[in-house]
Image (cartoon, rainbow, N blue to C red):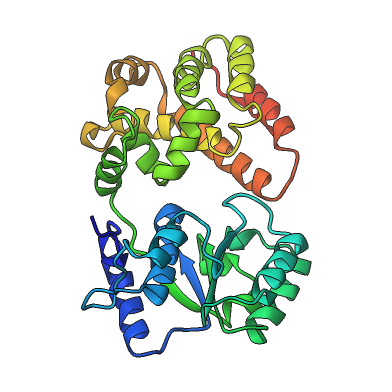
Amino acid sequence: MTMGMMAIPGAEPVARLLLGQLNRGRLSHAYAFTGPRPDAQLAMARQLAKALHCAAPDPRGDSCDRCVPCRRIEHGNFPAFQVFGAPGESIKIEHIRSIQQFLAVTSEAKTKVYVLNGADQLTVQAANSLLKIIEEPPAPAVAILIARHRKQLLPTIASRCQEVAFPVASPQQWSEELKAAGIPAMYAPIFAHLEMGPQRASACMEGEGFAEAIPLVIQWGEEVLRHPVPAMTTLQTLLQAGREDWAIDLLMLWLRDLLLMQSGQEELLAFSAYRPQLEQQAKRWPQEALLFFLDGFFSLQRMKKNNLNWQLAVEDMMLRMPRQA
């Protein structure tokens, strides 16, 4: 079955734009793929590299996904295509040196394609080195930077890239895409609201304890208003290493669903598979407490992003929480 750029769900406008530029010989030397779907953005970068090097493209110029170059790119052993970095990982000068080495190696391909995944995590030193490569590449190349927002890229980098904004799929569309990729139906709406693609969702389930985290969220929701001491222990367990990147978002999503239950908007639930627990807790949670914790967790997210000591702020938030009458 042919994959190609046009087959990436929800990204058809991006595929048409890139295919048009490819067919006219007008590909940019540097792109910034922006949006909340890094899996789709990485898939598009890989498919663009295939289309550029495909031995038997279809009439639209899209890749065949069957020839030797396409298969080598898919399996990560094509010398003119490479991915550097990962979402959430700091991009350091060592990554940029690896890009320099990649571009310096002679290849049978005329144009190389390199992807910087998580480009919004560039350190200043790495960004300055990358800027020189983008401006004066040692070999013909197409750079693809993947980031959530253009504004998260350093201005000097962003100004030299053509932004390609990926459409934001609705949670329902996203959930169906996740289920089609093998994510369990009970988890797919949750991952969709957390804006995780299939690869990221699979990583959460396989190595980051996602299935164990949901009962902890529900347990915390049961304990926090009446038994704050055990609730603090539950919260610390939930936020342990390996889950801190998404556990706060998961808590906020649960609180959001409690608000939706209270306002009669059950059709919008992310935790739809846990409706009985939501119904039970929604009867007990005062709206004041829900808003207090939503605001508190939002502040924790900002502190974590700025590398501040957010663990101490968790304890402070629990001490300041409103008590149930």
Q: What number of labels is visible?
A: 0
53 up-or-down from 251: above or below:
below
Examine the rendering and report whether any part of residue 292 can be seen: no
For the point 60% across and 68% down, the residue is 153
For the point 64% across and 22% down, the residue is 236
Q: Nearer the viewer, residue 136 or 77?
A: 77
For the point 65% across and 86% down, the residue is 135
User: Which image quarter holds the N terminus?
Assistant: bottom left
Examine the rendering and report whether any part of residue 260 can be seen: yes
Q: Is residue 267 left or right of residue 222?
A: left
For the point 39% across and 56% down, the residue is 40
79 up-or-down from 262: above or below:
below
Q: Is residue 186 left or right of residue 289?
A: left
Name the quadrant containing residue 281.
Answer: top left
Residue 127: x %, y % from top left? 71, 70
Residue 315: x %, y % from top left? 69, 25
Residue 157: x %, y % from top left? 63, 76
Q: Nearer the viewer, residue 188 or 25?
A: 25
Name the quadrant containing residue 98.
Answer: bottom right
